[in-house]
Image (cartoon, grey):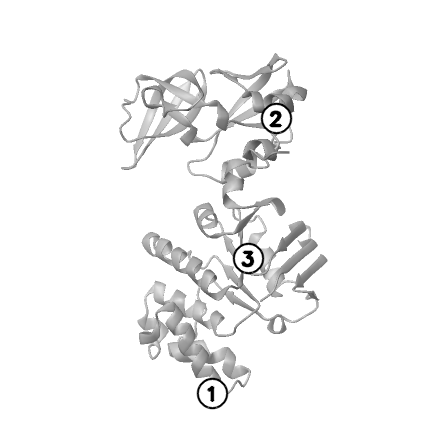
Amino acid sequence: MASVKYVSVTKRFGDVTAVNDLNIDIADKEFLVFVGPSGCGKTTSLRLLAGLEEVTEGEIYIGDTLVNDILPKDRDIAMVFQNYALYPHMSVYDNLSFALRLRHAPKAEIDQRVREAASILGIDHLLQRKPKQLSGGERQRVALGRAIVRHPKVFLMDEPLSNLDAKLRVQTRAELIKLHDRLQATFVYVTHDQVEAMTMGTRIAVMNKGFLQQVDSPQHLYDAPANMFVAGFIGSPAMNFFEGKMVGAEEELAVETRAFRLPIPPRMAHALKPHLGKKVILGLRPEDIYVASEVPPGIVGQQVACKVDLLELMGNEIFLHLAANGDNFTARVSPRAVATPGHPIDVVLDTEKLHLFDEQTQVALIPREIKLGISQ
């Protein structure tokens, strides 16, 4: 297997810059997920690594080898596409063995690899069927198997679960995680689904408009987003944002919004002193807002009077859509919470979980080390 490195990689299509100065080191055996909205450059980044697009500027390495001018077939990678790309006239066995037959591998080796991959994926009983006789999930396993038999240095996957129904996506997600653990291979995976990214990736690379926004572990992305885009993209429902201003003095700082005044925890105050008197954006995740009658022990919070606009009953939780003096926001609360649309309710905001962003640059103002509680 091998590591992958993007060094100042840029890709332009005429006047459009699809990928802009991308720098990422992907470790050997890592599962890295590119995630972002449509048109953000994630698929182009994958296609550049595969050799399906030419690099405009920069360098791409697989292991220690510069691959910019190496043909896709010689890069020792295997790609799994969204549409499976199976040969309809061939059996599953022949689809799995096709690349090996092209390389004139010995028949015994081909048979061994095909049956090994089929066993790993649980498709041993499907080897003589044609693709049209398979379900969507079975076709996806065959596409994965075709990649596995090649024993590539790097597996590339471009939204491979998009065509599956919701239940099968969850099941296949788990299978891919187990597959990565079993193969101990380098996986580079593209998706627009942040839930897929959070549950599968060793690290996640968040992209927007061709620019890499942040690369980090799923939990660190969630706890310490580098900017408002990452904060709003990672997490469902999305983070709530409030326009505000830093007020107070010395160690007693607060953020004042239209709806409330939220004190800044002492551990964050020193880093935020330079922003005193300036406009900021306050971020709070829906799960860090509690109905006042159901605040868990140990939560340090600020109570706010609101009105309930809407309830979304999810079974195991409730999404409360709230309004307070012109600010609208969402809380993710226990199904036991008592709330009625159109009626007032008191909620508590967890001050220890607040996020602050510069109004102009949208960059996070609280240092990552402080957010994660890392000693400096």
The answer, for residue 56, to whether it is visible in the render is no
* Residue under numbered circle 1: 107
**Quadrant occupied by the C terminus:** top right
Q: Is residue 33 left or right of residue 49?
A: left
Q: Is residue 316 left or right of residue 17?
A: left
Horizontal and vertical percent position of residue 24: 64, 52
Among numbered discs 1 and 2, the one appearing first in the sequence? 1
* Residue under numbered circle 3: 30
Horizontal and vertical percent position of residue 252: 58, 14
Q: Are marks 2 and 3 in contact (CB under 8 Å)?
A: no
State whether residue 28 is above or below residue 354.
below
* Residue under numbered circle 2: 359
The amino acid type, in three-letter code, at marker 3 is Glu
Element under disc 1: helix
The answer, for residue 183, to whether it is visible in the render is yes
Horizontal and vertical percent position of residue 308: 34, 21
